[in-house]
Image (cartoon, rainbow, N blue to C red):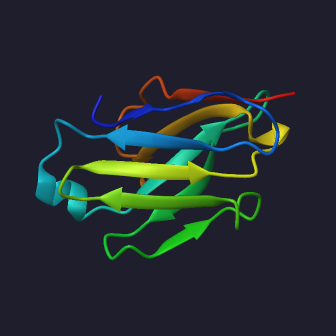
């Protein structure tokens, strides 16, 4: 698996989590040159792109998370992050990281559960 997500957990509505994605086997220049994204699969739903970030650092978000989630990257460490705030029950999902072409095999992802 080229990209490995971690940092999920169980939180109450309104809570926050920070997800991390590492790419230990990817060449640093390859990582830095890719548009990377966070995806999620909720109960009974198809995988959706939640946020993506270009090599330049510009980012965009799904409407459902805009203003609540922030994607960032550290190319020198080959790390991708997703800061999630004001979490809602509908954010409950398994979260994955990949590039914007979904080029790599999907890892196990990290479970985020938002429930009171």
Query: Does residue 101 lie above or below 19 as drawn?
Result: below
Q: Please state the horizontal and vertical placement of residue 87, each as a whole percent of the image.
A: 75, 45
Q: Please state the horizontal and vertical placement of residue 69, each as a whole percent of the image.
A: 63, 58
What residue do we see at 75% from left, 51% from top? Answer: 86
Query: Does residue 30 lie above or below 87 as drawn?
Result: below
Q: Please state the horizontal and vertical placement of residue 52, each as a whole percent of the image.
A: 49, 61
Q: Is residue 30 visible?
A: yes
What residue do we see at 33% from left, 37% from top? Answer: 3
Residue placed most toward the observer, 22 or 96: 22
Left or right: where does residue 85 sit relative to residue 35?
right
Q: Quadrant of the N terminus?
A: top left
Query: Does residue 17 lie above or below 52 as drawn?
Result: above
Q: How many numbered marks are there?
A: 0
Q: Please state the horizontal and vertical placement of residue 54, each as a whole percent of the image.
A: 38, 69
Q: Which picture quadrant has residue 43?
A: top right
What residue do we see at 74% from left, 41% from top? Answer: 91
Residue placed most toward the observer, 16 or 39: 16
Q: Which picture quadrant has residue 115?
A: top right
What residue do we see at 35% from left, 59% from top? Answer: 73
Q: Quadrant of the C terminus?
A: top right
Left or right: where does residue 115 sit relative to residue 21?
right
Left or right: where does residue 21 sit relative to residue 42?
left
Q: Is residue 100 visible?
A: no
User: In this view, which residue lies farthest toward the right?
Assistant: 116
Q: Which picture quadrant has residue 55?
A: bottom left
């Amino acid at each position: 698996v080229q990209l490995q997500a971690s940092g999920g957990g169980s939180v109450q509505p309104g809570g926050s989590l920070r997800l991390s994605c590492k790419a230990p086997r990817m060449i640093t220049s390859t990582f830095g040159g890719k548009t990377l994204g966070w995806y999620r699969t909720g109960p009974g739903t198809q995988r959706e792109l939640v946020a993506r970030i270009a090599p330049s650092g510009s980012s965009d978000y799904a409407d459902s998370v805009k203003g609540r989630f922030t994607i960032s990257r550290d190319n020198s460490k080959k790390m991708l992050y997703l800061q999630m705030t004001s979490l809602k029950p509908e954010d409950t999902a398994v979260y994955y990281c990949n590039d914007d072409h979904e080029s790599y095999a999907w890892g196990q992802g990290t479970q985020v559960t938002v429930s009171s």
